[in-house]
Amino acid sequence: MGGMISLITQNPLLGLILVFFLAISIGFHEAAHAYSAYWLGDPTPKLQKRLSLNPLVHLDPIGSLMILFIGFGWGKAVEFNPHNLKSPRKDAALIALAGPATNILIAIICSIIALVVNLSGLLSSEISLLITVLMQTLASLNVMLAIFNLIPIEPLDGFKVVAGILPSHLAYKWYETRQYGLYILLFLLLTGAIGGFITPIIDFITSFLF
């Protein structure tokens, strides 16, 4: 995406809209983790005051600065205690899946809003086009967050999702690879390999929705 600061400098309105959309998307993503962990029996997110849809609660200072300056960052990770879960491995997978699933749901809602606006004919073509572009932008950001986080590499959500699907004996071996996850992720990001892999998926889903 490139640094948001440069985009804000070149086009302040567009840059601020993207920052706002991204904050909302990350906030809902992390809130989904928090609520799902709480519903599955762990009070940790509630004790840490993470049961909120306010994006400011879920933004990580360093991760937010990274988004602004280099276009890649992260939200404040939701902590949970697996010992409070009935089925720690599978419930952890559900908690991890809740974030990307929420992003996909937001993207679907955006596509429905755009469809209703265009079919209703109640607004001018210019306003309808503006709403469609905004909804498509918000949807694309959410699809991007969902697909990126579903990559099965620690510390991304996809790692825990795979761990919850695998049989127990394979899951333990899978967990042994987590120590290498961050290095693998950084390598893929720096080489641009991740973008080459997930961009066609993001474009396909967004095109399908709109």
Image: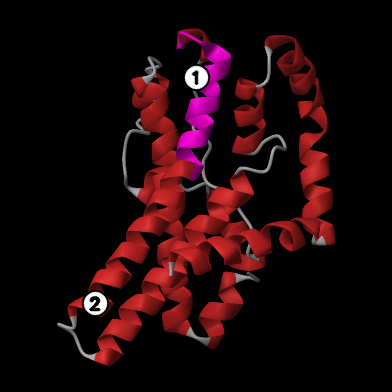
Q: What's the amino acid at mark 2? A: Leu
- Measured as percent of width and height from the top left, residue 96 is found at 53, 32
Q: Please, which colouring scheme is shown? A: secondary structure
Residue 91 is tagged as: 1
> Secondary structure beneath disc 1?
helix
Element assignment for label 2: helix
Q: Tell me the quarter of the image containing the C terminus.
A: bottom left
Name which quarter of the figure residue 162 lies in: top right
Q: Residue 135 at x, y = what percent? A: 37, 70
- Vertical placement of residue 91 versus 87, above or below: below
- Which sits in the foreground, 163 or 120? 120
Q: Assess whether residue 92 is covered by the magenta stretch.
A: yes
Which residue range is magenta in the image?
Answer: 85-100
User: Mark 1, residues whose alpha carbon is within 10 Å: few (<14), some, or many (≥20)?
Assistant: many
Q: Which residue is mark 2?
A: 119
Query: Going by the image, does 50 lie left or right of 100?
Result: left
Which residue is rendered at x = 41% and y = 58% of the image?
Answer: 107
**Where is residue 101 shown, x and y percent of the image?**
46, 42
Residue 34 within the magenta-colored segment of the rendering: no
Residue 118 point in image, percent of width and height:
27, 79
Which numbered disc, 1 or 2, marks the residue closer to the eye? 2
- Please tell me in which quadrant of the rendered image residue 190 appears: bottom right
